[in-house]
Image: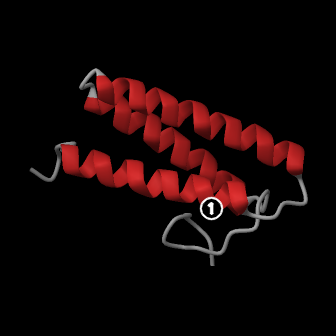
Amino acid sequence: MKDKITEEKLKKYFDITREAFKKAKEADSDNPEEKKAILEMVENYISDAEHFAEKEDVVNAFAALAYAHGWLDAGAKLKIYDVKDSRLFAGID
């Protein structure tokens, strides 16, 4: 079952992506316009994921969350917003 997208795995990924999104929104930024653009993309992908989940399309829901979290990680790595949480953001020291 390791290669399956279960409801539990999808819920966990929704939770961590939403938590990272909240932290990024609340974080300081020297680039407010860039931060706004990235967070808008994240918000759109989370919305897409919710739509797919409602349709019980877990594969596309998981994919949309992966894109959302990729944007969050990119913004953190590029220091668009100041976050220091390696649990929520990849590549953060």
Q: Quadrant of residue 38?
A: top right
Along the horizontal axis of the image, is 92 left or right of 52?
A: right
Q: Position of residue 39 (x, y in %)?
A: 69, 43
User: Residue 18, relative to residue 88: is it above or below?
Assistant: above
Along the horizontal axis of the image, is 45 left or right of 14?
A: right
Extreme-left residue of the structure? 1
Along the horizontal axis of the image, is 64 left or right of 44?
A: left
User: Residue 59, relative to residue 7: is it above or below?
Assistant: above
Q: Which SS class for mark 1? A: helix
Q: Which residue is mark 1?
A: 23
Q: Position of residue 3 (x, y in %)?
A: 17, 47
Q: Residue at x 50, y 51 (%)?
A: 18
User: Residue 28, relative to residue 69: is it above or below?
Assistant: below
Q: Position of residue 70 (x, y in %)?
A: 56, 47
**Which quarter of the image is occupied by the C terminus?**
bottom right
Q: Residues within 10 Å of mark 1 (few under 14, many from 20)?
A: some
Q: Amino acid at mark 1?
A: Lys
Q: Residue at x 83, y 44 (%)?
A: 34
User: Residue 52, relative to residue 12: is it above or below?
Assistant: above
Along the horizontal axis of the image, is 60 left or right of 34?
A: left
Q: Position of residue 68 (x, y in %)?
A: 54, 42
Q: Nearer the viewer, residue 41 or 55?
A: 55
Q: Residue at x 36, y 32 (%)?
A: 61
